[in-house]
Amino acid sequence: MNIHKFSIVLGLILITSCAYDQDDHLNQIPVLETHEAIAADSDLFENLKGIASHDERPDKSIVCIDFIYPLTLFVFDENTNYLYTSQLNNDQEFSSFLEAIDLNYTISMSFPITSTLDSGEAFTINNKEELKNAIDSCLSNELVYECGELIRHCVWKIGYSFEDSNPYLGSVFQEDDGFTTLAIDGDLLSGSWSPFTIENELHINININDTTAIADYFNRDWKATYIDANSLKLTHLDHELILNQRCDPNFSSCGNFNFEACETELNSGSAEFILNDYSFCIFDTLEFDDEDFNIVYFETEDDALSMSNPINSEAVFTTTEAHQTIYVLVKSIETNLDYYLSITLSAIQC
């Protein structure tokens, strides 16, 4: 998909209504045309922030539109009284200007805005509605394009959700020869991954070619929001699916929270584990930095909640069941945030 890049020139014209001439600013006060007002708490205002932003998150920046500076904006208070005029010379000044605006205020631009497509075709934006339509079209195309490109160049690994259970933790979505694959429990399923937008909201329609519970779980129209530049949260009704981007071809093979080791004796249902060996996988799946959190392991949930009788994670721990549940406290070093989860240690025949 070709994303058009707009080069936008804001012309300064004589003040006859909402227009304004810099040379006359000492003697004439701009009058707000309410139909051209851009409220600081509006979606259009937020999208203007996106144009000025260089955030890595695709939903926080709009790269397919560029303003050509300088540009002049007018600020009005909650009673539509003129406050001041700002001439802006670059994205940083524009971003700082927008961030400082009181949410009760409005801003106004001088129209018409002369614009140029990346094809060289020139056109004119004559009012706020045309500006909104141009930005909305750009934003929708950009969100869909970015979402489609990310799965073509990276994989999406299913991460841990603190809000919903996830039986397919560690499974991987990947684009392969033009169609989507889902690597899950040693199987490779094919399907489709179709991003689209509804009123500037990113959605992903997932369809896995399967007739089991896997299809029941994944085959939905998911609303997608970015947690950060590398993570998506998909929601459908009360279901939540976390996807973490992995662009390194040698990304961690950590799967779900079921860790296996060979039985110490045949049919004993017992195996030896050093729990610290699995801390990396837990951090990787939770998308936590190991410099910001500590991990402590417990044999019972009560011990985890009371933070008593921790397991020595650097010593050998011998399981007493074929599939033993271990309770994990992930504790923030700098704050009072605590996260609780469980892992399974499985003794298998080797």
Image (cartoon, grey):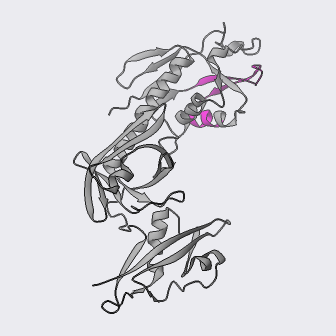
242 lies above or below 38: below
Q: Is residue 29 left or right of residue 138?
A: right
Hey, which residue is sitting farthest bottom in the picture? 265
Which residue is outermost to the left? Answer: 177
- Viewport quadrant of the C terminus: bottom left
The magenta region covers 69-96
User: Residue 191 in the image: x percent, y percent?
Assistant: 27, 48
Give residue 303's position: percent from left, percent from top.
61, 80
Total of numbered circles in the picture?
0
- Residue beneath the point at 75% across and 19% down: 80
Image location of residue 44, percent across then percent down: 57, 28
Using the image as rendered, state which of residue 130 and residue 165 is in the foreground: 165
Residue 111 in which image quadrant: top right
**Quarter of the image with the N terminus in it:** top left
Residue at 41% of width from left, 62% of height from top?
Answer: 167
Camera-nearest residue between 113 and 139: 139
87 within the magenta span? yes
* 192 lies left or right of 333: left
Where residue 31 sits, quadrant-wise, is top right
Can you see residue 131? yes
Residue drawn at point x = 46 percent, y = 54 percent = 242
The stretch drawn in magenta includes residue 65: no
Answer above or below: position of 70 versus 193: above
Q: Residue at x 64, y 9 (%)?
A: 14
Up/down of 31 relative to 311, above or below: above
Query: Eyeballing the image, is 135 above or below 96?
Result: above
Is residue 64 shown to the viewer in this render?
no
The image shows residue 257 at horizontal and vertical percentages of: 43, 70
Q: Is 215 or 105 nearer to us in this picture?
A: 215
